[in-house]
Image (cartoon, grey):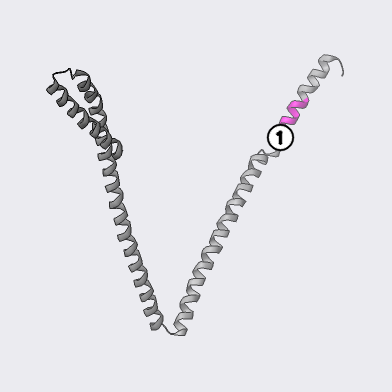
């Protein structure tokens, strides 16, 4: 873009020199002015695009600098964490370490078992709901429906002369 803009600006300068020469010679320079008028908007558009791209590049550079600062902070935090862990390790004796490890393991185990129980509970509930959907109708209502259908069938058979 920058190269295109420079080329257009060079063409405009050459055409302006050409106009001066044509004025001195007393010849018509309207055609050359029209060419300059065509090139000027292109140069302005390229200048605007370049300015926009420069803003984007500046924003990218700011973000890049911010990223570097953040990485530095993260590194410092990690180093500080390691230092604090080392200090804590030196303060804790073996018996207390065993106690802490067992307590943490117990919490992990408890959470795992709770998750399994919740999972199986959901599966059991789904199975019970499925059975309820299948078999929620009581036997006496099924027998009533059967007797009504039987009577209706007997009525049809009588009408047809089978009984």
**Which residue corresponds to mark 1?**
142
User: What is the span of residues highlighted in magenta in the rendered image?
Assistant: 143-150
The residue lying at 12 percent from left, 23 percent from top is 24
Above-or-below relation of 153 to 136: above
Please name whichever residue, 6 or 14, is drawn nearer the observer in this view of the structure. 14
Q: Tell me if 69 is positioned left or right of 90 in this view.
A: left
- Relative placement, left or right, of 147 versus 84 is right
Number of residues whose C-alpha sits closer than 10 Å to that of mark 1, classed few (under 14), some (14–19) or many (20 or more): few
Foreground of the two, 73 or 150: 73
Residue 131: x %, y % from top left = 66, 44
Compared across the picture, whether 96 is left or right of 128 comes to left
Q: Residue at point 75% right, 26% down?
A: 149
Name the residue nearer the viewer: 129 or 141. Answer: 129
- Is residue 144 on the magenta stretch? yes
Count of numbered tags: 1
Q: Which residue occupies 57% across, 59% down? A: 117
Would residue 78 appear left or right of 107 to someone viewing this image?
A: left
Residue 21 rendering spot, x and y as whole percentages:
16, 25
Q: Position of residue 49 (x, y in %)?
A: 28, 36
- The N terminus lies in which quarter of the figure? top left
In the displayed structure, 111 sits above or below 40; it is below
- Of residue 105 and residue 129, the one placed in the foreground of this image is 105
Dominant SS type (magenta):
helix
Q: Does the magenta run of residues contain 126?
A: no
In percent of width and height, residue 57 lies at: 29, 46
Query: Image quadrant of residue 132?
Result: top right
Helix, strand or loop at label 1? It is helix
């Amino acid at each position: 873009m920058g190269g295109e803009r420079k080329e257009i600006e060079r063409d405009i300068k050459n055409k302006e020199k050409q106009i001066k020469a044509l004025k001195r010679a007393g010849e018509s320079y309207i055609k050359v002015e029209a060419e300059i008028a065509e090139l000027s908007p292109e140069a302005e558009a390229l200048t605007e695009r370049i300015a926009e791209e420069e803003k984007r590049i500046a924003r990218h550079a700011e973000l890049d600098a911010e990223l570097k600062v953040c990485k530095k902070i993260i590194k410092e935090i990690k180093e500080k964490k390691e230092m604090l862990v080392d200090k804590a390790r030196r303060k804790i004796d073996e018996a207390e370490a065993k106690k802490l490890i067992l307590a943490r393991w117990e919490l992990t185990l408890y959470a795992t078992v709770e998750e399994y129980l919740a999972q199986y509970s959901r599966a059991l509930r789904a199975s019970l709901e499925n059975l309820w959907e299948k078999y929620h109708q009581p036997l006496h209502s099924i027998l009533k429906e059967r007797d009504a259908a039987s009577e209706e069938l007997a009525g049809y058979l009588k009408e047809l002369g089978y009984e």
